[in-house]
């Protein structure tokens, strides 16, 4: 058997495993796309609702005091 003949011989088990890996990769890609497009806007919406419900808002730090220094 020459080298080119050996290369052409494919083990069906290897092909099947490779196909499974490709299918799993495709499914993961589709799921991650769905998560990015569908789920993250919902999460952001919920976080905004929580932010509105959060009544206590600390006062912003008065930076002019630090910039002027002690007089």
Image (tube, rainbow, N blue to C red):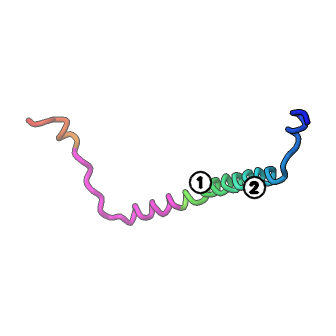
Q: Residue furthest bottom?
A: 53
**34 and 59: which is toward the camera:** 34
Q: Which residue is depicted at the point 26% across and 50% down?
A: 60
**Bounds of the magenta segment:** 43-62
Secondary structure of residue under mark 2: helix
Secondary structure of residue under mark 1: helix
**23 and 44: which is toward the camera:** 23
Q: Quadrant of the N terminus?
A: top right
Q: Which label was assigned to residue 20?
A: 2
Is residue 63 depicted above or below 21 in this figure? above
Left or right relative to 58: residue 68: left
Left or right relative to 56: residue 5: right
What x and y, as percent, mark residue 7?
85, 38
Q: Which residue is depicted at the point 88% across and 40% down?
A: 8
**17 and 69: which is toward the camera:** 17
Instruction: Determine whether label 1 and label 2 are within 8 Å by CB.
Output: no
What x and y, as percent, mark residue 33?
64, 53
Q: Residue furthest top?
A: 3
**The quarter of the displayed image where residue 32 is located:** bottom right
Q: CA distance from mark 1 to mark 2?
A: 24 Å
What x and y, as percent, mark residue 48?
45, 60
Magenta run includes residue 56:
yes
Q: Which residue is depicted at the point 42% across and 64% down?
A: 50
Upstream in sequence: badge 1 or badge 2: 2
Q: Which residue is mark 1?
A: 36
Magenta run includes residue 7:
no
Q: Residue furthest left?
A: 71
Q: Quadrant of the C terminus?
A: top left
Is residue 42 depicted above or below 1 in this figure? below
């Amino acid at each position: 058997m020459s080298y080119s003949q050996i290369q052409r011989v494919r083990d069906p088990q290897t092909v099947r495993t490779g196909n499974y890996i490709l299918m799993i990769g495709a499914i993961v890609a589709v799921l991650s796309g769905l998560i990015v497009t569908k789920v993250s806007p919902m999460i952001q919406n919920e976080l905004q609702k929580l932010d509105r419900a959060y009544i206590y808002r600390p006062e912003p730090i008065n930076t002019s005091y630090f910039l002027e220094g002690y007089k």
